[in-house]
Image: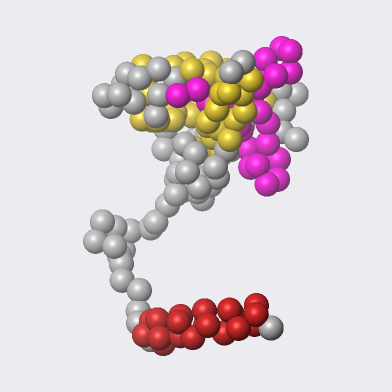
Amino acid sequence: MISQLRISLILLILLPFLVQCQGQQATVSPLTPPDSPLTSPLDPTATDPALEAPQPPSSGMATAFGQAINAATGEPLPHVAVRLAEVYRGGENGAFVLDEALSPATLTDSDGRFVLDNVEPKEYVLVVGDVNVSYGIIAERSGDAKVWDLPADDLVDMGVLEVTLN
């Protein structure tokens, strides 16, 4: 009974806002011209321009770059998501956290190359692929996730990364 009363009260409070929003049209952001296609850094349908050489990061930031290849075939992994999962430490132990909405991310180009521009200088673990479908975590020979230190004002070459997508 009490939970039904709470739900009714919440709906009663929200009802005026919902009614006010009804019939209003969305506006286009002035930052994006209405005739330009909106693309995301993780949009596989976006055009595949030749990946340019990584540029030095903005002051206080870091840039990482590399190439992802299929560990089994040696072929590049084109148009695959590359994400940085932030490492959190508590003493000697640590954990990494991937936030699909906020973690730095990009797509590889047709040759499997990627650049992660102007990311916060922190420790990260590299996750390649779609975490909901098929992905690989770059690991050390021991099997532990490889931790990348991205220092401020630095370009970090991650090299050629052999990836097994699970």
Q: Quadrant of residue 93?
A: top right
Q: Is residue 22 visible?
A: no
- Of residues 6 and 101, the one drawn nearer to the viewer in this rendering: 6
Residue 125, horizontal then vertical, whole percent: 57, 26
Q: Is residue 13 above or below residue 39?
A: below
Q: Is residue 115 visible?
A: yes
Residue 83, horizontal then vertical, whole percent: 54, 35
> What scheme was used to colour the molecule?
secondary structure
Q: Is residue 69 magenta?
A: no
- Of residues 5 and 78, the one drawn nearer to the viewer in this rendering: 5
Position of 139 with respect to 154 (left or right) is: right
| Quarter of the image that includes the C terminus | top right
Residue at 40 percent of width and 81 percent of height: 17
Position of 4 with respect to 31 (left or right) is: right
Residue 103, horizontal then vertical, whole percent: 49, 39
Q: Is residue 139 magenta?
A: yes
Q: Quadrant of residue 28?
A: bottom left
Residue at the limit of the structure toward the left, as seen here:
30
Residue at 54 percent of width and 42 percent of height: 99
Residue range highlighted in magenta: 122-146
- Of residues 52 and 89, the one drawn nearer to the viewer in this rendering: 89
Residue 39, horizontal then vertical, whole percent: 42, 52
Position of 39 with respect to 161 (left or right) is: left
Residue at 65 percent of width and 80 percent of height: 2
- Of residues 147 and 79, the one drawn nearer to the viewer in this rendering: 147
| Quarter of the image that includes the N terminus | bottom right
Residue at 40 percent of width and 24 percent of height: 121
Q: Quadrant of residue 89?
A: top right
